[in-house]
Image (cartoon, grey):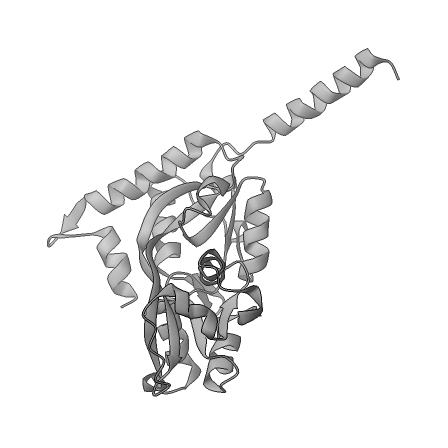
Amino acid sequence: MRIKQVVMICLGIAALIFNARANSLSELEYLTESYPPYNYQEEGELKGISVDLLRAALARAGEGLPRDNIQLLPWPRAYKMALAGPERVLFSTTRTQLREDSFHWVGPIIETQVVLLARSGSEINIQSIDELSNYSIGAIKDDIGEQLLLSFGVPAKRIKRAHSANSLLKMLNKGRIQLWAYEENVASWNIHNSGLDPSLFESVFTLQESELYYAFSKDTDPELIKKLQLSIDEIKSEFIGDGHNLYEQIISKYR
């Protein structure tokens, strides 16, 4: 094949890729996990603070969220898909320095706190991150809990990985791990809905206070990212009566 023909074919492929680029927020692929009260599925319906805020922001931007454009997946799989693209949005995602350059960010959705939970009465008393290596700690692969532990120098062999919060809760309850690294509100939600007595568990150390965001794969059109950010900013700033706004109503719905 002549060089000219090869060049023409390559240009043709590039043109197809460019033309196939999403022209609206509703054309993007949205990925989420079971992470209540922020995003979860109940009786076949996706719910949560981040889900409701996303739908409200898209509606404000004059768009909708097609049902087949949002997938509920295990976090490790969703995280890898968002990193790879194309044009994917992962939520709710804790924004950290480690992840900063891997995505484009829209938000914040809400403040968040990642903690270590122990069995009540365990008498675990952690004063600094240097002590974390003394314990077996459960975490979900690629979750913020695991990433923070590794960044703090906790040996990988001390981290017991699982694919779901329920698995880690059971491991902690049965004494197979000493600590569970997870977002505090999500952990509380899982404990409450597991049928276990919440008083059996307690938070013993805060790994990080941060915020949750919508994380866009790097190939996403910057104009679409700006469009969603503007809609969320407007929802947070405009009051709709009685001194409240839609953002506050969404949050109060899940508290």
Q: Position of residue 126 (x, y in %)?
A: 34, 73
- Residue 197 in the image: above or below residue 58: below
- Residue 30 in the image: above or below residue 74: above
Q: Residue furthest top?
A: 4
Q: Position of residue 208 (x, y in %)?
A: 35, 59
Kindly identify the residue that appears in the image at 73 percent across and 21 percent down: 10
Q: Residue furthest right?
A: 1
The answer, for residue 160, to whether it is visible in the render is no
Kindly identify the residue that appears in the image at 58 percent across and 40 percent down: 86
Kindly identify the residue that appears in the image at 66 percent across and 24 percent down: 14
> Hey, which quadrant is residue 233 in on the image?
top left
- Residue 131 in the image: above or below residue 105: below
Kindly identify the residue that appears in the image at 41 percent across and 48 percent down: 214
Judge left or right: residue 83 versus residue 103. right
Give the position of the C terminus as an image quadrant: bottom left
Circle count:
0
Q: Residue furthest left?
A: 242
Give the position of the N terminus as an image quadrant: top right
Q: Which residue occupies the foreground of this view, 38 or 171?
A: 171
Q: Which residue occupies the foreground of this view, 222 or 208?
A: 208
Judge left or right: residue 240 versus residue 104. left
The answer, for residue 58, to whether it is visible in the render is yes
> Hey, which quadrant is residue 18 in on the image?
top right
Q: Position of residue 100 (x, y in %)?
A: 44, 43
Q: Position of residue 83 (x, y in %)?
A: 56, 45
Q: Residue furthest front?
A: 130
